[in-house]
Amino acid sequence: MSEDACAAQATSIGRRMERGCGMTNCERIRNAVRPYSGQTLSSGKVVSLVLSMYASTNPTSIIPSDHSGPNPRSGRNYCSCSCSTTQVFTRSGGGYVVRGASDGINISAAPRSSREQAAASNSRHPAQFVAGADREVLVEALRRMKPSIRESSDRAWRRDAALRVIDCVLSFNRSYDSFVVPRLDRFERARAGVRTLGQLQGLMGIYPSAPAFVSRCLDYNDDARAVTLTKVVDWLVGVAGGGDYNAQMSNLKRWASGAKPEDHFKLGISGFGLGGFQYLRMLFGANTTKPDIHIQRYVASCVGHRVSDVQSLALLEAAAIDADVCLRDLDTTIWETSARRA
């Protein structure tokens, strides 16, 4: 049966499944990972898949180990699926193997939604669940927009590594041109020797606290944001590694290109979510998008309904390839058109 025929057959139940109405977390997880039977998934991957299909799910409630049999230490079952024909996973080292029909799971218990069908057939984006109709509409919109997509000339993409990280964390819910850029420019003039993440970490360590550094060096009083900046810098210093500036930039660019959106769950940094993680990847050269309000509004205007950050990211990742456009340039074109014109 073709994808369109399957989607038509499952329209009503697919809508219910996409909303997750009346469904337990176990059912949501089972539906989300079904196309990956026999594959080993990380906890972060499972969370990303569930949120791609059921965006309203609380990420902290998605616990794969609860659906992979008894706890190895206590012997306790945390979900009724454990040790039954509907158990979702079996443990494999640090990951979780998705059980399939041959393992006793009743796969036919719930028909696939159109989003599941699209994901199962999309080998280029196996980790994303993309509604077929929305994707096609967005592809056509991107093709029409393609002649106007340009590489950004903004200085953000050429600043030193230390400035890029400050840019990323300061820009959350702030006016970029009137708030962030002046602070970056002043810091750049006053601290011209601070280029690497290690140098920035060292400078921050001189001050009695993270808020003190942010207040005195960036003219910004926000204790929570200061703590977030410190944690992001400390983590990214390890990514950059040693060596000279060029070697560290190569490491950061390699990380940005190889990272996945769901990797942000592994960091556990308060105040640093999917949007910030994706913007950081972009700042170090990744061909991706940050699902901020401007991106969500653009996708929603194309598909005709509201979309979450996860949904807009999944749709654009898939549609950009089909439309043969650079996703990073698409993001900056949309942002500069929307934010700066506003």
Image (spheres, grey):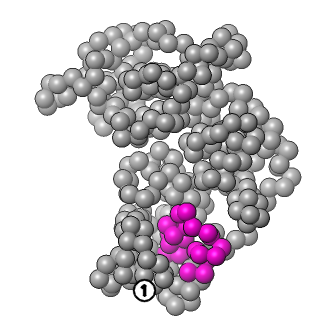
Q: Quadrant of residue 59?
A: top left
Residue at image coords 48%, 83%: 219
Question: Residue 211: where, in percent of width, then height?
Answer: 37, 77
At 36% across and 9% down in the image, what residue appears? Answer: 104
The percent position of residue 260, horizontal first and vertical second, equals 51, 47
Magenta-drawn stretch contains 160: yes
Q: Is residue 261 above or below residue 74?
A: below
Q: Residue at x 64, y 76 (%)?
A: 178
Do we see residue 230 in this rendering?
no
Whole-percent x, y for residue 171 in the image: 55, 67
Q: Is residue 115 above or below residue 224?
A: above
Residue corresponding to mark 1:
216
Q: Is residue 341 left or right of residue 157?
A: right
**Residue 47 can be seen, yes or no:** yes
- The residue shown at (61%, 69%) is 175
| Residue placed most toward the observer, 295 or 72 | 295
Q: Residue furthest left?
A: 74
User: In which quarter of the view is residue 115 placed?
Assistant: top right
* Residue type (three-letter) at the residue carrying disc 1: Arg
Task: Please report the bounds of the magenta region as a residue range.
Answer: 159-183
**Residue 27 left/right relative to 150:** left
**Nearer the observer, 7 or 251:** 7
The picture places residue 79, in percent across and down from the top left corner, at 28, 22
Magenta part, dominant SS: helix
Q: Secondary structure at mark 1?
A: helix
Say if the magenta span includes residue 220.
no
Relative to 86, does residue 162 appear above or below in the rendering? Answer: below
Question: In the displayed structure, would residue 152 be above or below residue 46?
Answer: below
Query: Would you call the spot at circle 1 few (<14 residues within 10 Å), some (14-19), or many (20 or more)?
Result: few
